[in-house]
Amino acid sequence: MGELDLLKPTLERQLGGSIHFGRVAMKPGKPTTFATIPVKSNSGERIDKVVFSLPGNPASCVVTYHLFVLPSLHQMAGVEPRGCARVKVQLDGDVRLDRQRDELHRAVVKAGGDGLLHALSTGGQRSSRIGSFKGANALLCLPAGEGSIKKGEMVDALLMGKLVGDV
């Protein structure tokens, strides 16, 4: 991202592509790019190929893969439903909000004996902290805002993996 990012000019000028978006207002994953480039198919007809440019920080890359690339692959393969399943979870601890951007916060979601799904943060959420994915099976969908969402409140979560046992 920035002056030294040569991907967007290369996609547009050298490959004749179209940038559909070059940044997203979310955390992590701001420098995500989606483009299409025209190519010829094996039969000679003109088709568009999709190109995703994911952020370089490990956690940002994994989050944007689940949010953008996986649903696209599912659509191309005819898989339904597309992407990660969205569920309601109850927070088992307070979670701070980012003031400026919506956040996809790594968490562990477990099925509780009370019939609810419970979510617990995996800790520090810096985009360079791939360790925040250890044990994580979900991304909490948090809105931008002041303060925090309190323990016991319900939020949406995207399931990236299997649910684990009782809390």
Image: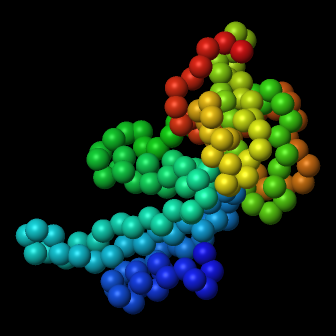
Q: Nearer the viewer, residue 61 or 37?
A: 61
Quarter of the image that includes the N terminus: bottom right
Q: Residue furthest right?
A: 147
- Residue 130 sits above or below residue 41 on the image: above
Left/right placement of residue 167 relative to residue 35 reads: right
Examine the image and state in which quarter residue 140 appears: top right
Residue 159 location, x and y as percent? 56, 35
Residue 149 location, x and y as percent? 85, 40
Q: Residue furthest top?
A: 113
Q: How is the image coloured?
A: rainbow
- For the point 59% across and 33% down, the residue is 137
Q: Residue furthest left?
A: 43
- For the point 72% across and 29% down, the residue is 119
Q: Nearer the viewer, residue 34 or 86?
A: 34
Left/right placement of residue 127 relative to residue 95 reads: left
Quarter of the image that includes the C terminus: top right
Residue 60 location, x and y as percent? 61, 55
- For the point 62% across and 30% down, the residue is 135
Residue 156 seen from this side:
no
Residue 3 seen from this side:
yes
- For the point 85% across and 46% down, the residue is 96
Residue 157 location, x and y as percent? 64, 38
Examine the image and state in which quarter residue 12 appears: bottom left
Examine the image and state in which quarter residue 41 appears: bottom left
Marks counted in the figure total 0
